[in-house]
Image: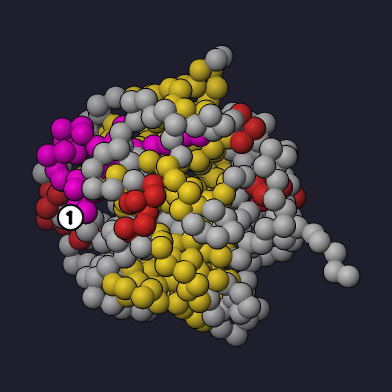
Amino acid sequence: MASWRPDPSFYPSPRLAAKAPAEKLAYVAAFDPDRKTPDAVAVVDVDPASPTYSRIVGQVAMPNTGDELHHFGWNACSSCLCPNAPHPHMERRYLVVPGLRSSRLHIIDTKPDPRKPSIVRVIEPEEIAERAGYSRLHTIHCGPEGIYVNALGNAEGKEPGGIFLLDPVSFDVMGQWEMERGPQKLAYDFWWHLGHDTMITSEWGTPDTFENGLVPEILLGSKYGRRLHFWDLHTRKHQQEIDFGAEHQLVFELRPAHDPRKAYGFVGCVISLKDLSASIWTWYRDGSKWAVKKVIEIPAEPADPALLPPVLKGFGAVAPLVTDIDLSMDDRFLYVSCWGTGDMIQYDVSDPFKPVETGRVRIGGIVSRATHPGAKNGHLNGGPQMVEISRDGKRVYFTNSLYGAIDPQFYPEGIDGWMVKLDVGDQGGIRFDEKFFVDWPKGHRPHQVRLEGGDCSSDSYCYP
């Protein structure tokens, strides 16, 4: 009789997850910005010993056009081992893939052949609107109680945005997560501290303020998101709001510490209206409340206005535009994507209040157009955007497209997609893997990366 044991890719603690076998495949969301051909999830070979290393070796196309695939995730992960809601019989098998523009959810089976994933269910926007009251699906996380999905708009595409749950077995829409919303209206990212029963959510804007690109009047009027919200994860009630101030716009990606004993995390702010700088903030427990502190400021770089897109010409500078961040499994290194300047920066955040820069590479960028050793083209566009880290922290992958309607505002000639990989030194430091450059097939742009068996932003842990 076969023994009943948890999925081998589930780990009770981040320390054990860091000892996991190296990933051999990456799943990458790719979308057509013209909305004429279906979006797809591509399978990329990331095994250096493989003859097809650094190549797309499979893909599954969506059944419709115009989804704008975004931040997808696994149906199950290490939080299935948590003591408060255990279901260790679950299997990390299905990718839950949201369409940010279509509000459609796709359930993709990665077995029996992980290079040939297949769609097993499509949940239409009408069902999500009826059962949960939301639209414009943005991010997927596996949690102890099921699959969490956040949405940037209500059923009509207005505020409030929020979170709903899917049943992790049937994939049925169970309903809206929030019990008491408090002042929260805008949504963007969400994560949690399982050890502190706390959910954190960040803000962007309602769909009408970004689906045709960023609106300068709304940005300069400080009407995009600038707040963090803290919730009781168990009772699903809003507890606290922190306003970063009118200068700070687009408070985006959240990365809590992986160690469940630690009550802190990092969030990126895309732009300061004062000087175009970007910033990283640490949120932390301060007595009985949560607090934030700006710990990194990345300045804009002066540039010839003739080289700048219209949206930046008047400023005479390139904004760093920090659009994604990621934290290594041991909570030591924070990676910061500067989509505007083209920098990927590594910081040692062993002390979360005193980051130290330990590595930097440049690729693409609005003005610099830096190349890569493996690229045939000498001038690359786009810049470091969606970033993902292997569980052992030794490899970092990233792609170069932000969002279909926003890409041409900063890269007017359009973006030619690519995916690259960095190797990480034992004591920090990063360098390009010269043999890994995926020149993305024309017609699609790559976005979110998920690694086979899990990565540094897919799982949460209940044991230190």
Rendering coords of residue 247 (x, y %): 25, 28
Rendering coords of residue 355 (x, y %): 52, 34
Q: In the displayed structure, does residue 222 sit left or right of residue 2?
A: left
Q: Amino acid at mark 1?
A: Asn
From the viewer's side, name the closer residue of 327 and 383.
Answer: 327
| In magenta segment, residue 218 | yes
From the viewer's side, name the closer residue of 253 and 145.
Answer: 145
Q: Quadrant of residue 400?
A: bottom left
How was this image coloured?
secondary structure
| Circle 1 SS class | loop
Q: In the displayed structure, does residue 412 sit left or right of residue 425?
A: left
**Residue name at image x 53 percent, y 76 percent:** 117
Q: Which residues are magenta?
A: 199-227
Q: Quadrant of residue 366?
A: bottom left
Q: Is residue 436 visible?
A: no
**Residue name at image x 38 percent, y 69 percent:** 30
Q: In the displayed structure, does residue 135 sit left or right of residue 177?
A: left
**Residue name at image x 23 percent, y 75 percent:** 36
Relative vertical location of residue 32 with respect to residue 334 in this rendering, above or below? below
Rendering coords of residue 394 (x, y %): 63, 57
**Residue name at image x 14 percent, y 43 percent:** 216
Q: Quadrant of residue 60?
A: bottom left
Q: Residues within 10 Å of mark 1 (few under 14, many from 20)?
A: few
Relative vertical location of residue 108 with respect to residue 287 in this rendering, above or below? below
Q: Which residue, given by chain and number where applicable, does mark 1 sit on? A: 212
From the viewer's side, name the closer residue of 438 and 362.
Answer: 438
Q: Which image quarter is the N terminus in?
A: bottom right
Rendering coords of residue 193 (x, y %): 58, 35
Q: Is residue 143 visible?
A: yes
